[in-house]
Amino acid sequence: MFDALSSALAFIVAISILVAVHEYGHYLVGRLTGMKVLRFSVGFGKPIWMRTGKDPDRTEYCISAIPLGGYVRFLDGREGPIDRADEGRAFNQRPIPARIAVLLAGPAFNFLLAVLIYWALFVAGENVPRPVVGEVAPGSYAAAAGLESGDRILEVGDRRTPDWEAALTTILDRMAADGRVPMTVADADGRERTITIDVGDEKTRLTEPGELFAGLGFKPWSQSSLLGAVTEDGAAFAAGVRVGDRVTAIDDEPVRYFNEIPALVQPRPGETVGVEVERDGRRLTFDVTLDRVERDGQAVGLLGVQAADDPRTVWYFRQYGPVQAVGEAVVRTWNSSVFTVTMLSRMITGDVSIKNISGPINIAQFAGETAQRGLSDYISFLAIVSISLGVLNLLPVPVLDGGQIVYQAVEWAKGSPLSEQAQIVGQQIGILALILLMSFAFYNDIARMLG
């Protein structure tokens, strides 16, 4: 119950932030281009808080009851008569370039938010996993291509892959294109070679959520649960855990890899957990009262242990100066935007599974999980969803910003607005398209929940 509530709260906070940023883009550019703003609302439905601005336009600023969207309402001559004092300030009375600028501003601010988030993360620095291969399943596509445990993926196609995010997005992109994934890899001794994973007609199935690694036949490298260090003033040492122990379970939850431990202990600061270890062929269980530390403004639990394998071989600390981080953040946002557009287009052509479409349930679960892991993970999630929101709103669907931009472009080209009937038909088609999209999304969410 608590996880569901925390996920719902994290989702509402995320949506409220992203919608407020999106609508502020419309609002700001509308004001700058001389339009009269009647209302700026975060949320739909009945306002639960409202303030009237002191500006001459007396704009209403409100938070409404349904926190799943928002809107900016401009004065518009199509909705009724306009006072003589406001002539020329209605949305439909402003020049078409100004209207298009207002419509573009919402998605643009979503992309700008992503750039700002990535900039902040790059300046603060972050631990990043290198794309090192773990287990390779015998008889799999990866094994047939010659991929081996311990290989580090240097390039996929002609794109450098310094971390797992770059590697995964590029693998998906190349696989969806023609079923072939060319890679340049290096073994543990640094010897480079080129391999190609060929999945043939299986490419669409392998793009389904959770199928990529299992289908290709390899996993990311994970540190074993063998302990190479136990902090002497930490919780584990005080309970009797020692260097050389292999953690096998925490509160009866099996542990195979070291990176499974944080997920089991971090959400439980100050609590006592049963840590089962293997020592000299024997199974021992210790009651460990976890340390409580502050991380990114949130209390987390710690055991006070480190893996036996040197994490520097797989993880590295990435940090940029304030100026260099700007360019890196723009590139990261651009690459993520292009990847999103590419995947959407390939869903339409059938090269990528439509099971990748996520609805509010799945997004809420991700919001809750990232919020529990800490502030940096949560704002990274915000950046990803903000990019998706920006791309989605640029689609040429009449009820979205992209569709309205098409209307304005047509009016600009023909010298007069589309007929009211044509606009109504377009709106109906747009609403139907969104209903179908949301139906797929909810179906996928429920299917994931049911396994």
Image (spheres, rainbow, N blue to C red):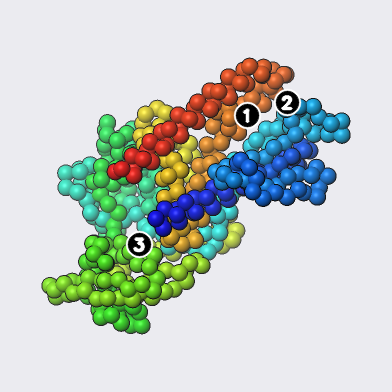
Give the mark, 2 or 3, whose residue is nearer the N terminus.
2
Residue 1 location (% of width, % of height): 39, 55
Q: Amino acid at mark 2?
A: Arg
Q: What is the spatial separation of the Cα atoms under label 1 and label 2, in whole angstroms? A: 15 Å
Question: Is residue 219 shown above or below 413?
Answer: below
Q: Judge depth for marks 1 and 2 and give the one in front.
A: 2
Q: Amino acid at mark 3?
A: Ala
Q: Residue at 48% across / 56% down in the picture?
A: 378
Residue 404 location, quadrant? top right
3D distance between C-alphas at marks 2 and 3: 55 Å
Q: Which residue in the protein does label 3 denote? A: 263
Q: To which quarter of the image does residue 224 belong?
A: bottom left
* Whole-percent x, y for residue 417 in the image: 70, 20
Element type at mark 2:
helix
Residue 118 percent location from the top left of the image: 53, 54
In depth, the one of 82 and 120 nearer the eye is: 82
Mark 2 crowd level (few <14, some 14–19, many ≥20, 10 Å Cα): few
Read off the residue under disc 1: 404
SS for callout 1: helix
**What residue is shown with label 2?**
78
Q: Residue furthest right?
A: 85
Q: Is residue 199 left or right of residue 312?
A: left
Q: Of callouts 3 and 1, which one flags the residue occurring earlier in the amino acid sequence?
A: 3
Quick check: can you spot residue 122?
no
| Residue under the image location 38 percent in, 36 percent down | 443
Q: Position of residue 194 (x, y in %)?
A: 29, 46
